[in-house]
Image (cartoon, rainbow, N blue to C red):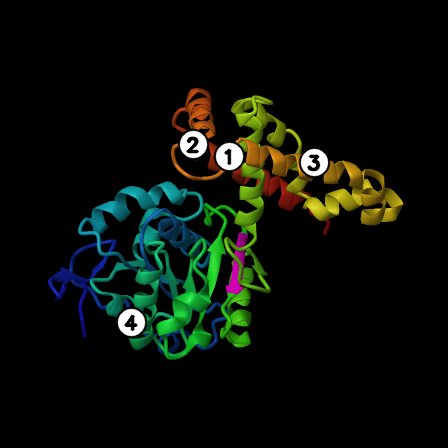
Amino acid sequence: MVLLGDAVDGRPLVKLAALTPQPHLLRHTSSTSDPKSKEKQHQIAIIGSGTIGLSFTALHLVQNPSSTISIYDSRPDLYDYITAHLPHYISPAECSEQSYRDRIILAPTLAKAVEFADIVQEQGPETEEWKTKLWPEVERHARSDALLWSSTSGITATVQSKGMKDKSRLMVVHPYNPPHIMPLLEVVPGEKTSQAVINRTVKYWRSLGRTPVVIKKECTGFVANRLAFALFREACSLVAQDVVSVKDLDAIVTASMGPRWSVAGPFKSYAAGGGDEGMGGFMGKIGGTVQNCWEASERDVEKHKINAKKGEKWEDKMIKQCDEAYGHVDTAERDARTRLVLQAVRDSAPK
């Protein structure tokens, strides 16, 4: 048995709360849980402790209070990094620091991080080479029934799993940043992902009060980013043409689409615009205007060379206006206000 504080491959396996030796917490929870307990105790392995990794760690700790989290990251200052940054993701009102520190373990190796986990969640480098090397290694050391999730923004489970023996185990669970606040999780199966894995994944996130949506087909960027980046491209195009400034465009969105889409997405919103005739009525009334806007958008994007390649003139203009309008964005204020909006939406939802 490995004790907390013992060295494994030259690195200590430590509980975040203390560096003194204590009984090893990375254990098979099903053998130690009270069978009468209605709350399943999850062992969750977090691979990669960047922004998304810490955000997911906070989400599991707060919304799943019986969970134990093992974190694996190759950075040498992991202990100092976690203790310095994780408190920014968890308010004392949600969970006391001592409480969640007692449930975090810093693993010295990938094998030690995943060996008893029933959920393995990856937030590593966004490269195909790294991810395709990772999952066969996880597969060798993780439990055979562990859920395997990647938080990738664009590398499909089908691609990531190509080196695995059992490709049915892996799927993408793509968050909308930051996941400890935003409720959406895009559940994106690979071509070989089993229905049982999909069902267990959806059940877990619903139990935490999140909004998991199963994406029917793998596609570049999945769905949320496709929508967000389509709007962003149009926003960049309008700024490039001097139709509107960066700051005024943001004001337009936050005073119109932002609040409306928080309670009804584009299809429901435009269906409402069609009155008794619904979406058919809406398209019948202003379908021509919609088409004109689409065509103008394509022409303008081509004319002003709106693409994401570094160094384009339009990009310099947009970046300069963003810097002048916002400087360093206070994400703490943004997150606090976002929480209030989400709470208001939940409170106003039909019972």
Q: Which sits earlier in the primary sequence, circle 2 or circle 4?
A: 4
Residue segment shown in magenta: 184-188
Kindly state the secondary structure of the residue where label 1 is placed.
loop
Helix, strand or loop: magenta stretch: strand
Q: Look at 49% across and 75% down and name the residue there.
A: 192
Q: Which mark is residue 137?
A: 4
Viewer-side label of 2, 4: 2
Q: Quadrant of residue 207?
A: bottom right
Circles 3 and 1: CB distance less than 8 Å?
no
Q: Look at 58% across and 61% down and name the residue there.
A: 215
Viewer-side label of 3, 1: 1
- Residue carrying label 2: 312
Q: Look at 33% across and 46% down and name the residue there.
A: 86
Q: Which sits earlier in the primary sequence, circle 4 or circle 3?
A: 4
37 and 174: which one is in front?
A: 174
Q: Is residue 277 left or right of residue 87?
A: right
Marks 4 and 3, how far apart at CA: 49 Å
Circles 2 and 4: CB distance less than 8 Å?
no
Residue flagged by tag 2: what amino acid is it? Glu
